[in-house]
Image: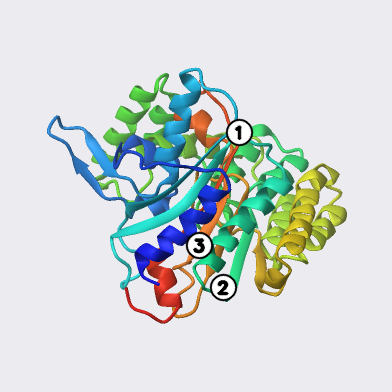
Amino acid sequence: MTEAAIAAAACGVFEAFGSRPVDPAYILRSDIPLELSGEAVRARLCVFTDNRGNEMVMRPDLTLPVAGMEAERLTSGGTGAMAYCYSAEAFRLPAAPDDPMEFTQAGFERFGLHSTPYEDAEAFALVHEALAACDVSPVSIATGDLAVFPAFIDALGLPRVTADLLKRAFRQEGGVRALVEATPQPIADDLVPVLEARTREEAETAFRATLAARGAPLIGTRSVTEIISGLRARAAADAAGGVPDTVRDVIGALAAVDCTASEAADKLDAIAVRYHLSKANAAIDRVARRMELIRDMLPDLKAICQFRSGFGRRFTYYDGFLFETLGANLTDRQPIASGGRYDGLVAGLSNGRADASAIGGVIRPDRVLRAKGRAT
């Protein structure tokens, strides 16, 4: 099969399942992916300035522009569930030296259906049905659930500022470890004006002035707004007493969950029982039920499905079930297929004017060819 034939085969499966073919905008305002993508993704965006001086990006994936289409439909009076599919180009700086900057994604996005383990499992099965239509077999599948960590944090009954800080740190590589191992320290005197500023503009001006006075450049992919938000949350959490030892123990236990997907619910339940966190049971039950359904729908994949508690956190707009499917001849940073749930994205893109549960999945035809032992 050629790359075009692989894309057509995958899209044929998605379209037969009721998805409408679309090819959304190639170019997005930079604030959309900058605000909604994780740091690892932001560093790979193809950014440019248009003739009016506005910063723009080429679409880094199809999920963002398709979700934008759905947000527009709903805010214009549209109702009911909707599903889209596509075979279209995306643009990102390569994750690996042998990856292209421009590549095709064949995928689907489904909006407005119930956010249930069944819908998670069905989307997972749909992606793997499409892979089967492309005549390629996965060698391993990584799964996770970005709702699990917040559920355990909420079950601990922490002050809100501490809970919010931990949830934010979870999305940053090494963020939780740095937070729980840190000794509470007073905020530096030159940052006090940043914390006391009354508006976002005043805070950003004060922060940039502090950097200039220190002779420190602004480096990394986090925005000034994010850095200030983190400073304020850290100060509030320290004022509330920092991170208790019990929380450190729970977080350490969660971080150690790296097992077969079939074992995941039992591992999580053992942590909940040990630390008396019954309020996390709903999230654990969802993990268990989802895997039961996946086993029923795709029994042959049970043996290669893994679960890791921290998997997927680099993608900020995802907020639930996530998976990446790996093939032969590729690294673990080059999945042939991936997908996940992002129930809060439509609300974020519409500034709260619309809301819709959402889940999607994509296949990379160029990587499928490589997994089959053929160069693209």
Q: In this image, 160 relative to 183: left or right?
A: right
Residue on which the image places disc 1: 112
Task: Give SS at disc 2.
Answer: loop
Question: Measured along the vertical axis of the image, is residue 174 above or below residue 72?
Answer: below
- Of residues 146 and 89, the one nearer the viewer is 89
Residue 246, relative to residue 79: is it above or below?
Answer: below
Q: Is residue 323 visible?
A: yes
The amino acid type, in three-letter code, at marker 1 is: Gly
Mark 3 in CB contact with mark 2 (< 8 angstroms): yes
Mark 1 secondary-structure assignment: loop
Calculate the distance from the C-alpha at mark 1 to the C-alpha at mark 3.
23 Å
Q: Earlier in the sequence, mark 1 or mark 3?
A: 1
- Classify 10 Å Cα crowding around label 1: few (below 14), some (14-19), many (20 and above): some
Residue closest to the far left: 51
Amino acid bearing label 3: Ala
Q: Is residue 85 left or right of residue 4?
A: right
Q: Earlier in the sequence, mark 1 or mark 2?
A: 1
User: What mark, if any, has residue 138 been given in the picture?
Assistant: 2
Task: Tell me what residue is drawn at x 56 percent, y 74 percent.
Answer: 137
